[in-house]
Amino acid sequence: MLLLIIFLPLLVGTVLTAWSGSAAQPSSSQRSRTAWLAAGVTATSLILLLAQAPAIMGGQAQTSFTAWVPEIGLNLGLRLDGLSLMFALLITGIGLLIICYAHFYLGKEDPVGKFFSTLMLFMAAMLGIALSDNLLLLIVFWELTSISSFLLIGYWNHRAESREGARMALALTGGGGLAMLGGFVLLGQMAGTYELSQMLDQGARIQADSRYPAALILILLGCFTKSAQFPFHFWLPQAMAAPTPVSAYLHSATMVKAGIFLMARLTPVIGGTELFFGIVSVTGLVTMAFAAFIAIFKHDLKALLAYSTISHLGLITFLIGLGSPLAAVAAMFHILNHASFKAALFMVAGIVDHETGTRDMRLLGGLRHLMPWTATLAMVAAAAMAGVPLFNGFLSKEMFLTETVSFAQAGGWRWLVPAVATLAALLSVAYSVRLVHDIFFNGPARDLPHAHPHEPPLGMKAPVILLAGICVAVGLLPSLLLGPMVLVAATAMLGTAPPAYQLAIWHGLNLPLLLSVLALAGGAGLYFMLARGRLLHRLNSENWFGLLTGLHLFSRGSDRLFNIAGRLTAKLETASLQRYIAWMLITTVAVAAVPLLSGEAPGTGSRVLLPVSLAALVVWGLLLLACAWLVLYHHQRFQSVVVVGVVGLVTALGFVSFSAPDLALTQLTVEVVSTVLLLMGLALLPRHSPHESSTGRRTRDAALALCGGAGIAWLAWVMLTRDHDSIAWYFLNQSAIAGGGTNVVNVILVDFRGYDTFGEITVLGIAAIGVLALMDGMRTRRPATDDQGLAWTFAAQPLMLRVAARVVLPLALVVTLYIFMRGHNQPGGGFIAGLITAVALVLQYMAMGQSRAEALLRADGGSRFVRWIGMGLGIAGLTGVGAFVFGQPFLTSAHGHPHVPLLGDIPLATAALFDLGVYITVVGATLLTLSTLGMVTRESGRTQTPRATGGDQA
């Protein structure tokens, strides 16, 4: 059930919304359908969470475990307790409102399929973070949020500021994620497990470990970069180039709360120490005050809200670092309150921008007369953000001030904490008042891009109305509405129930209340003092820090890194393949020479050697002759390609001698296909290489070749003359039992090492599509003859070749089926079958010509072959994912021998489906490469360029 909550948006949501909104200019009904699909998937995940809520609210914790890559500790371990339930409900609940709002916000020219599918991916990643019980799984989802947020922030990729903001967010949060990965590895080593459920009660042992400080700092780097804590705060305002629905979602309930969530989740493990308190609480307090001050002077409405978010995240970070049980309660309460008023305010900002065409508060003013509903909703949400009594923000902010005062009771420097906290609260009132006054009061608007703003449609206002209502309702009835949720979340964070407390409006006359009143009065007074004579509109905080702003330091640092990288590249990347290989060989030979020169290199082992047969001597001689010919005549490229095939032939004979017919068949078919493709590629280059190497360079190359060859020969001799324990016996013994097949090689490829094979066919598909991308649109004039006077192409394909091709194709397909079906128990399999099919189809190209062959194959300019690659990878991947349904690791194979009347027992294995994906991918990749290379010398007016989507007339 927990896995389904994540997989719904991850798989169903992304696919359905991408499909629904895939049209270049989707109609109104298609746009609505896409939004409804996104909302339906989100609502389903929300309902599934609510169905688990009664048990969680009762103090239970639900876990789910599925082995994924257990050898490295990576498993699909999920955990739903009070803390993860609270965050998951925020992610899906706020997400549902964002989807409704975005449907009305996005313009007709905005691609809805791209927006909602990326939003679904981001939502799934955030749910994965909230529900992960495995640290390595959590880091997978953590980085997925960085990638998906990069896509969301850069959604308007035609805008330079969007691209820059997306890159900056990815650089900061991605870099923090790498640091966090290092911390998680250390934490897992200290705890002996990566499962949080097993780690939560090991806090004392972990904190006593000498590796604890390093792990803590690395983990906090990831948390601070993700949650925009000082000094990593500057990426968040730059991310305001994203569409407003994205900003509202990132700021209120998702990405920037991920670091907060992780600090809360790991508090029982890494919290409670002086080091944790010193780093986390100080960082939070500085961030809160600094960002609140900067927010006052921001003239862009979304920039003001961005800095206010940074400030409130600092408040929550401080409470988590403080470490007291009631501080944890206040942190959980403020997370919920902040989500409601910040989402509402960002939606208001989007409405104002949508209706007026600007977010510059120096131009806005007096909109309360034109947009009274929006003004009212903004005032409610801003009052909650400022901490005005009877709104939810007042309650959590007063709890925060109470904790600062309790901390200061020990006296001394500790009284600085409530003083800074009160100052930050005062500044938050000032920027909240500015937001309302500058937009909806402060005289008439000036020079608006949209001269006649008006109220937006109800669909844009409805989510804001609901959130504003929550701000008021929670402010009046906090214990009834949020009390149970805050309690279970704080209990999950602390590992034990907090002491008795009360969420109430009135706690009597006390110092925290006095500080709240001081903040309200002082903040309002500060704003109106700065606003007198529009002084505030003439101030720019960016000018005050000069070269010390985080944005400037980051930009200057990255520019310097790029400059250094450019200079190094210019020196190292000389466009000489000879020089690259020479330096690699020199380095390798130098490293290998150290043990040789010191006399510590191993010599001949004690293994009994086999006698050399006459056949082996003949094969070795043939190999030496081929290599010698290549050295002397390598400038003749076409002959060289054919002679290189001798090396492949010798390799195949070696496989035959070692009783490996599968490998021999694979080697032979690979040689045929690669020879054809290499000849097609070389046809685009000069027939002979220019003689450009000097005598000195040839001498150097010869010396390096001899040293490198001698070194490889020495390593091979050292290894082959020693006895060793082979892992082959494991596969021989387990092939039939665990893999359901007697062909050990095929069982290894599709079962034991199926993950490797999946990666290999993925690389094969990428390589073929890379050839298409590199040569798309490339054309070269086809000569009538070559430099020896031979015709470049046949005037007409030879009759015997055409007849032979017609006979060979059906026979080859029959052989392909035979080879494929027997592959699990006899020599064969999907890879060999795919190559045989490819060879037969290559023969059709040669016999018919490319145009006729592709017309019969309905290649559609090569796009069909791209779809074949996608289909093959999809089948292989879904076969692996199907194992999860039965609680098994990825690509676990099932096998059996069902009895069929007349036919008897038939061996079946799900690995055959994986092998089918391999087969289709191999055929598609080969034909796509063949089609692309052949397209280059075709007449540009007679055909189409191969494209993934069919292409346009070249």
Image (cartoon, helix red, strand yellow):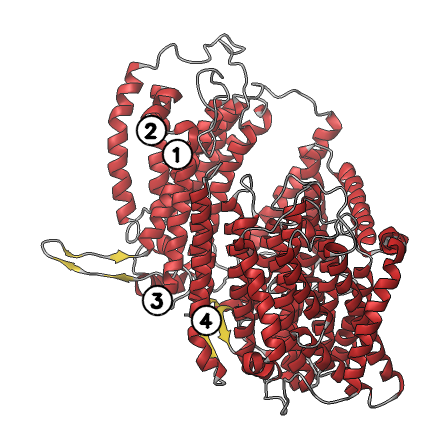
- Indicate whether 217 appears above or below 16: below
State the residue position of label 1.
864
Question: Which residue is located at x 38 percent, y 20 percent?
Answer: 851
Q: Residues within 10 Å of mark 4 (few under 14, many from 20)?
A: many
Which element is circle 3 on? Answer: loop
Q: Nearer the viewer, residue 413 or 711?
A: 413
Indicate which disc, 3 or 4, sits on the residue closer to the N terminus.
4
Q: Nearer the viewer, mark 3 or mark 4?
A: 4
The numbered mark, 2 or 3, whose residue comes first in the sequence reads: 2
The Cα atoms of the two marked residues, 1 and 3, are separated by 34 Å
Which residue is labeled 3 in the image?
886
Q: Amino acid at mark 3?
A: Phe
Q: Earlier in the sequence, mark 2 or mark 1?
A: 2
Q: Amino acid at mark 2?
A: Leu
Mark 2 vs mark 4, foreground winner is: 4
What is the CA distance from the residue labelled 2 to the residue labelled 1? 9 Å
Residue 539 drawn above or below residue 397: above
Q: Which residue is mark 4?
A: 49
- Which residue is rendered at x = 28% and y = 50% of the image? 826
The amino acid type of the residue labelled 4 equals: Leu
How many angstroms separate mark 2 from mark 4 (CA)? 49 Å
